Amino acid sequence: MPWPLSSSKRNNCSRSVAFEDACRTLAKTLRYHSNLFAEAISGIEAMPARLWYGQVLLNRLLLLYDLQVAGFLGQGDRWYLHNHLGHCQQQQPNRFYRHYLQPLCHQGVGLPEIERPLPVQTTFGQVPYLGSRLFQPHSLEQQYPEIDLPDEPFELLLGWLAEQPWHRTFEVATEPNAITRITLAGAWEYWHTGRTGKAIVSAPETLQDICDHTLDAYVLRALHQHQGHPGPPVASVDALIAELDAPTCYLLLETILPRMTILDPACGSGRFLLMALARMGQLYQACWTQAQQSPDLKGQSWGRSPQAAKPTTAWALAARILTQNLYGVDLRPEAVEVTQLQLWLALLSTTSSLDDLAPLPDLDFNLTTGNALVGFIRVDEQSFDQIAPKRQCQAAETVLQGNLLQPLTAASYRDTLAEKQIRIEHYRAQTKAMAEAGGIPEYVQTEFLRDRIDEVNQAAQQKLNRLLLETCSQTLGIQVREPQPTGRTHKRLLIPADIAALHPFHWGFFFNRILEQQGGFDIIVTHPPTGTLRASADEFYSQYAHRFQPYQIDRAAFRRSRRLTLQQIPALAKLWATYAGRFSYLRAYFRRSEAYQLPSTPAATRSIPLKTLFAQRCAALLSPEGMPPYLYLP
């Protein structure tokens, strides 16, 4: 089982300058190719969306290339993508994206073979069905249906990939420029941490140390508590694996591992979740091996199921961990997509045969997009109907809090949660009946169910956002303060769009089972964004670079003369007022909300460190029996 924290590799994965340099170089190259895609895109105007879609294309091509290296495309064609790019260019230049790559994703690996149109099957040849959101129509593709790209950026990326040794393992490669899972993970980490602070590469030994203090410590403590001190504590998880016996294996499989929850509330590139997958994979693999050798354990259902699972035991164990133990949130959807890509690549590493390949598990319910710092962790049910509107004239527009939580007929937050669960069970039963009656394909059943669950989630999100608006406006008395080019500040009341712009993540609804039934997450490890909560000229310019282009204003010029620029260009001034005003009510929210305890000094009022906010939020999300949150601050 190719896990990156294999105990046999611990001494070989020492931190080295060469490894870090390799990750940095790879990150810069990947970012270069992603930016080439973004610059070449037609059909999308805004640069942030272009950059996002450039990364979507890079994610798709890296996973497809991994399948190509494994021999899973075109009956083992190791030059599958290159050959089809050349064939498209022979027919007509600049048609690879629209006429081959996009259909390959949407109608090839994104659809079961039996559902693919016959011309598509002939064009693509033998390609596996992966059932992944990565290859289904992206939200950007739905929003901008006229997206197109020339051949050149694809030719450059595939040409570069052909020159690099690509290994589908977690070994630290000794070959120059070799790409392995661990090097790719380090590159993604360097890229994504650089977007919100200083770019870093966590050396393998650093990850081992973090794992020792979090996941390993939790497992050893849980074993010690359950076993009732039968003997001296086990020194390490490596020693536990080496000396694993049947009673310990039973405790791990029956009690500890299935219920363990691991969260990264700023998952970024997914580096820490990948670390957790590795360690849990080792533990599960060791337990399963022990279960096969022990007469007392071999007959247990959990001991038999991985062996009988399709496609392989290693795949089944990894998929179980991905869907039952690992959770992540990030404000940037592209970061969540990279995290999913990393975990899927790790899963693909467990098989080297096309016959053992199965659809990738859906990770959307475990890895989600949202602002981890804003939103409800728990909702006080008794207070829902106790807050009345401040003024009776607002009665037509303002609803009691209890009524705000009605996706259908629910009258309370708990009723909303129950209604969601009823819908899940109802549509599972309905799709099962449809399948038995009409032979509905499994992927159609899955999409049918997901659409209905998404409806409830979206309705709940809207209601909870309205509840947050009521709390901020009426309970906390927060207003928006928008800076004007004249130097004055325009004050106004909060509106629903202000709350939606924060992208609140309501933990109590989306992870209700973990927070209510288990009291919180067992292990929380994250690398919080650095810096303070403030408006940034650089960030603003990055978001609205396309709005500056007609005026030929570059980033440095805007940074030097921001006030003068805003005074001369009213359209930019209006955008800046909205952007900077958002930070004004965010700061007020963090200072006044009971969810946070911040110093009230003038300096603290002006500058709120993001790491402080994440530390307090992690503490609130932690189970009473959990390990102390681990905030990685290199």
Image: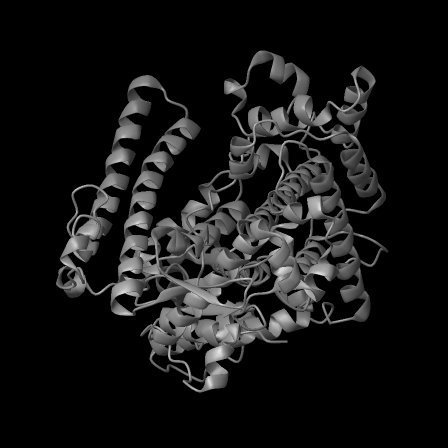
- Image quarter in which the C terminus is found: bottom right
**Residue at the extreme bottom of the image, as rendered:** 601
- Measuring 47% from the left and 45% from the top, which residue is drawn there? 307
User: Residue 595 or 348: which is nearer the viewer?
Assistant: 595
Residue at 70% in and 54% down: 184
Query: Whole-percent x and y of residue 45?
Result: 63, 38
Q: Is residue 377 above or below residue 345?
A: below
Q: 115 and 556: which one is in front?
A: 556
Seen in the picture, residue 282 relative to 67 is either above or below; the reply is below
Q: Position of residue 628 (x, y in %)?
A: 44, 77
Q: Is residue 209 above or below residue 47?
A: below
Which residue appears at 54% of the width and 22% of the height? 113
The tally of labels here is: 0
Residue 324 image position (x, y, % from top left): 41, 53
Q: On the picture, is 515 further left or further right than 587?
A: left
Residue 107 visible somewhere in the drawing? yes
